[in-house]
Amino acid sequence: MICASISMDLLSILSILLSLATLVYSQNFDVTKYGATGDGKSDDSQAFIKAWKDVCGSTSKNPTLIIPEGKTYLLNPIKFEGPCKSAVAVQIGGNIVAPSNSEPVWKETESKRWIAFSNVKGLEVSAKGKLDARGADWWRTCPDMKGCNRPTTLEFGGCSSFRVHGLTSVNSGRNHISISGCNQGTLSSITLIAPNESPNTDGFDIASSENIEILDSNIGTGDDCIAINNYSSYINITGVACGPGHGISVGSLGINGEEAKVEEIHVKNCSFIGTDNGARIKTWQGGKGYASKISFEEIEVTNSSNPIIIDQYYCPHSVCDNQTSAVTISDVTFRGIRGTVRGENAINLHCSEKAACTNILVEDINLNSLVPDKKAYSSCTNAYGRSSRSTPPIECLLKQQLKSFFFWHW
Ligand SMILES: *[C@@H]1O[C@H](CO)[C@@H](O)[C@H](O)[C@H]1NC(C)=O
Ligand SMILES: *[C@@H]1O[C@H](CO)[C@@H](O)[C@H](O)[C@H]1NC(C)=O
Ligand SMILES: *[C@@H]1O[C@H](CO)[C@@H](O)[C@H](O)[C@H]1NC(C)=O
Ligand SMILES: *[C@@H]1O[C@H](CO)[C@@H](O)[C@H](O)[C@H]1NC(C)=O
Ligand SMILES: *[C@@H]1O[C@H](CO)[C@@H](O)[C@H](O)[C@H]1NC(C)=O
C-alpha cells in the first residue's frame, strides 16, 4: 500500500517534470516523430496533420514544425489551419511531392489547391527543399481547367505577418503560390519553375491582400510571373527575374462586370528575359472601380514582346463586346525600362474610350528591336499624361504636351 502510493507520487512528479521540460525545451515538432516516412511513396499527410495540431496548439515560444532534410514526403491535398496559440515556424528541409493526378484524393477534395495555410498569424516558413506538384499530367489531361481540380501548389489564405524564405516550387498544376486575403507578408528568395508552354502556371497570384513584399526571386513559368488581382494594395515587387513567362501583371481586372480596387503597386529592379509581355496592366471591358498609383521602375528587358503594355480591352480567348464602363487606370509610372524587344511592339497603351488612362508618365525608356536593322514602335489610344526621354517616342503623349505648351504660352 505504502509502496504503491510512493511510486504513484514518483510517477506524478516525473510526469510533471517531463511536461515542464516539454514546455521549456520541446519547441520542435518533427514530422518523422509523428510517423512520416519520407520515402516518397507512403502518404505522410496524417503525420503532418498530427504534428501541425501540436505545433499550432503549443504555447511555447516559436514552436516549429520540422520537415527533415534528405527525404521526400508524399502529401495529399492538405490544410494547415490556424489560428494558432503562438507564432509558428515551418522548416521545410526535405522535398514534398503530390500524388499523381489520377489518384482518387483529387476527386474527393473540394478545393483546387494542394498545400494551404489558412488563418495563421506570424507564420515563418523557411525552406531548402522543393515542392513538386507533378503538374505535367494536369496540363495534359485538363488544359482548360474545366471539370477537374487542377491545384494551386501553395496557398496562403487569411494570413497576417508572415514570412516565406527560400522556397522552390516546380511544375505546379495551376499557379505556384496564391496569396489571398492576407496582410503583411514578405516572401524572399523564392524560385518558381515550370515550362514555358505549361498552361495557367502563374508564379504568384495576389488577391484581396495588402502590404505584401516579394523580394529577390526567380520565376520562369508558363503564365504571368506575378499577377496582382482585385482588392490588393501596397504590394512591392523588388529584384525579381522573370522569364520565361507573361511578365508582371496588374490584373486581369473587372471580368464579368466585377469591381476592382487596386492601388500602390510598385515593381522595381526586375528583369524580363524572353517573356511575352512585361510590365502589364490588363482590364476587361465592362468592369468597375480603379487601378491607380502603380509604378514599374529600373527594369532590364531581354528579348521580350510587349515589354510595356496597358490593355483596357483584355480578352484573350474570344471576342468581347465593347462596354460603356471599364476599370479606370490612373497615376501609372513606367521609368527606366531598357533592353531588347522581340517583334515590333515596345510600348502599347491601349486604353478605353469610355474610361481613359490618365496621368500616365513614361520616362527614361530605351527599347530597341532585337534585330539590328529593325525598329521597335509604340502605339497609344486614349492615354493621357506625359513622356520624356523615350525610345521609341510615344506620339499621343508628346502631342498632348505640345498642345498644353501652346495653351499655356499663347
Ligand atoms: C474580386 O474580389 C472579390 C472579393 O474579394 C472576390 O469574391 C472575387 O472572386 C475577386 N475576383 C477576381 C477576379 O479575383
Ligand atoms: C514600396 O515601394 C514604394 C515605392 O518605391 C516605397 O515608397 C515604399 O517604401 C515601399 N514599401 C516597402 C515596405 O518597401
Ligand atoms: C536588384 O536585384 C538583384 C536580384 O535580381 C539584386 O542582386 C540586386 O542587388 C538588386 N539591386 C538593387 C540596387 O536593389
Ligand atoms: C527570343 O525568344 C524566343 C522566344 O522565347 C526564342 O525562340 C529565341 O531564341 C530568343 N532569341 C534570342 C536571341 O535569345
Ligand atoms: C472595341 O474597341 C476597340 C478600340 O476602339 C477596337 O479595337 C475593337 O475592335 C472593338 N471591339 C469590338 C468587338 O467592337
Image: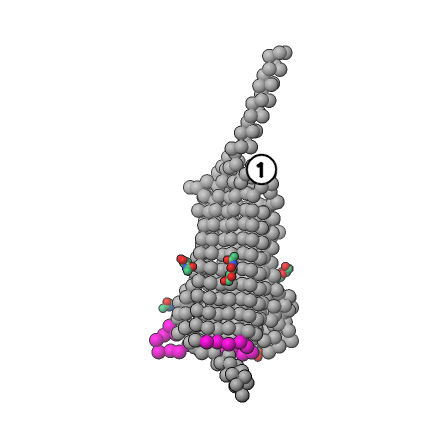
Question: Does label 1 point to a residue whose CB lies under 8 Å from ligand 2?
Answer: no
Residue occupying the point 48% across, 76% down = 387
Q: Residues within 10 Å of mark 1 (few under 14, many from 20)?
A: many
Can you tell which quarter of the image residue 369 is in? bottom left
**Which residue sits furthest front?**
409
Q: Which quadrant of the frame does ligand 3 lie within? A: bottom left
Residue 406: % across, % down: 52, 86
Front-lying residue, 154 or 318: 154
Q: Dividing the image into 4 quarters, which one contains the C terminus?
A: bottom right
Q: Dividing the image into 4 quarters, which one contains the N terminus?
A: top right
Residue 7: % across, % down: 58, 16
**Per the image, is 115 magenta?**
no
Secondary structure at badge 1 equals: loop
Front-lying residue, 119 or 145: 119
Picture layout, residue 89 above or below residue 378: above
Picture layout, residue 384 above or below residue 75: below
Front-lying residue, 42 or 383: 383
**Which residue sits furthest left?**
372
Q: Which residue is mark 1?
A: 58
Can you tell which quarter of the image residue 365 is in? bottom left
Colour mode of the rendering: one colour
Question: What amino acid is at disc 1?
Answer: Ser
Can you tell which quarter of the image residue 59 is in? top right
Residue 179: % across, % down: 56, 55
Residue occupying the point 55% across, 63% down = 264
Front-lying residue, 178 or 173: 178
The residue range painted magenta reads: 369-388
The answer to whether residue 403 is seen in the rendering is no
Residue occupying the point 56% across, 60% down = 234
